[in-house]
Image (cartoon, grey):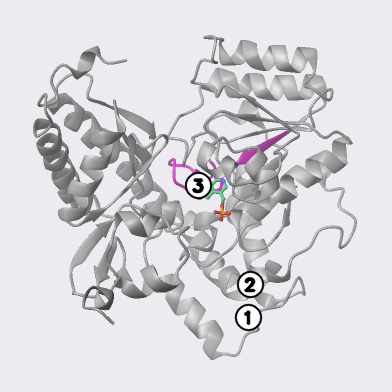
Amino acid sequence: MTETERTPLAVFERHESNVRSYCRDFPVVFERAAGHHLWDTSGRRYVDLLCGAGSLNYGHNPPAIVQRVTAYLAAGGPVQSLDLHTTAKADFLERLSALVLEPRGLGDFVVQFPGPAGTLAVEAALKLARKVTGRTEVIAFTGGFHGASLGALAATTSPLLRGAAGVPLTDVTILPYGDAAGPSGTDPVAALEAALGQGTRTGPPAAILLETVQGEGGLHTAPRPWLARIRELADATGALVIVDDIQAGCGRTGTFFSFEETPELRPDLVCLSKSLSGMGLPMAALLISPETDRWAPGEHNGTFRGHNLAFVAGSAALDHWSDPHFTAHAAELATAIRTSLASIIDALPAGVAEAVGKGAMSGLRFTDTETATGVRQALFRAGVVAETSGLGHVLKLLPPLTMSLTDWKEVADILGDTVLTTVAAEPLGGRGRSNRP
Ligand SMILES: *Cc1c(COP(=O)(O)O)cnc(C)c1O
């Protein structure tokens, strides 16, 4: 073994597939995590604003959740149970219904556990929508990310991911997202109306699949009138509305579901995953309106539908939603984030960056990927882990919703200094950029 092979990263470089990605941007080895902090093997502490791409809305290892999981294990509760009845699943279903669904007018929805990954909730939703309507085509939108398995991938627009499919990705029509013009400058509402009016290639669609805030796609936020029109057009054509709330849900935008401030949207199917288990255990759920639950028993399945540790953790996580201090704090943090971003932008030369996203799912969109990458790298040197998304020019900030305002303020100061220094160090000192498209 040569000297270089003995670096702490050598094991990954030698044994892990070339497909690995996030780890390339943060080349250290993490050993410990608590709240909004991560520690590497040298003992260095980082502030984590990546948070498992939004799967750690309650922070790393939240003590109240960890305690319930360890107690369940210590008591010898079953861990794997396919879809058998367990007390852990009963508790989770009761809490989800009482604390989330009923107060939000979705009390008659039922829950399908499709398996441990977000993409499995999307696959189940697409399959069910096609079965219920007897149609094949699905409408999805530019910038959407729904998962890497073939059905969800067909509705995902990242060229890198699509290019790896190896087979044609069919039966999905991609239209411009609500805040984006189409290739010929078409307005997204008109594009949607035209596509539905003419029928898609194979007739009226089975479903319209969307994120209300695009997590991986660069924090595009759908305007309310566009969302309302989606429901109207779905009703007019007999299509179902599927909201992929895998990243934007579980409180990320300030309310449990990202569509609560848009009651007109009334989804038929809602995909949840990421922060659903509350501590990063794999878990996904598909919420199904009563009219749409036309599955025959066993018609769709998966071995890991019954991950009881995730049910136990998820129940503890849902308890946050009965605590008015938690919900008030999440809303305050969301406001504090937007205020910090606005003041960072004020301090920058005009046109260098804009604030994008919604609530605690916000970030800075730079005019180019170089600046965004430079900021991400400088942040990491300053001990902050944050990712870039979209076409690589959006710095995405996903702090735990439990982070205190004082801690956020400290991070926001580092962020502000880092952005200013990075922009000032660029060839034009950040000037002259306002003329760029
Ligand atoms: C992460 C994500 C998915 C896919 O979830 P996986 O667990 O990675 O399969 C789907 N949709 C959205 C909006 C996501 O953010």
Mark 3 = which residue?
A: 247
Mark 2 = which residue?
A: 307
Tell me if label 3 and label 1 are in contact, CB under 8 Å.
Answer: no
Q: Which mark is residue 16?
A: none
Q: Is residue 62 left or right of residue 158?
A: left
Give neighbour class at mark 2: few <14, some 14-19, many 20+ (Cα, 10 Å). many
Look at the image and tell me in which quarter the N terminus lies: bottom left
Give neighbour class at mark 1: few <14, some 14-19, many 20+ (Cα, 10 Å). some
Q: Which residues are magenta?
A: 241-257
Look at the image and tell me in which quarter the C terminus lies: top left
Confirm or reject: label 2 Cβ below 8 Å from ligand 1: no
Looking at the picture, how far across and down is residue 380, in whole percent? 21, 53
Looking at the picture, how far across and down is residue 201, in whole percent? 79, 22
The residue type indicated by label 3 comes to Gln
The residue type indicated by label 1 comes to Val
Residue drawn 56% across the image and 36% down it: 211
**Which one is nearer the viewer's eye here, 215 or 294?**
215
Q: Is residue 186 left or right of residue 382?
A: right
The residue type indicated by label 2 comes to His
Give the vertical position of 319 relative to 415 (above or below): below
The answer for how far apart the CA atoms under marks 2 and 1 are is 6 Å
Q: Which of the 4 quarters of the picture holds residue 144?
A: top right
Mark 1 = which residue?
A: 79
Confirm or reject: label 3 Cβ below 8 Å from ligand 1: yes
The answer for how far apart the CA atoms under marks 3 and 2 are is 20 Å
Looking at the picture, how far across and down is residue 246, in whole percent? 55, 48
Residue drawn 80% across the image and 18% down it: 199
Is residue 67 in sight in this rendering? yes
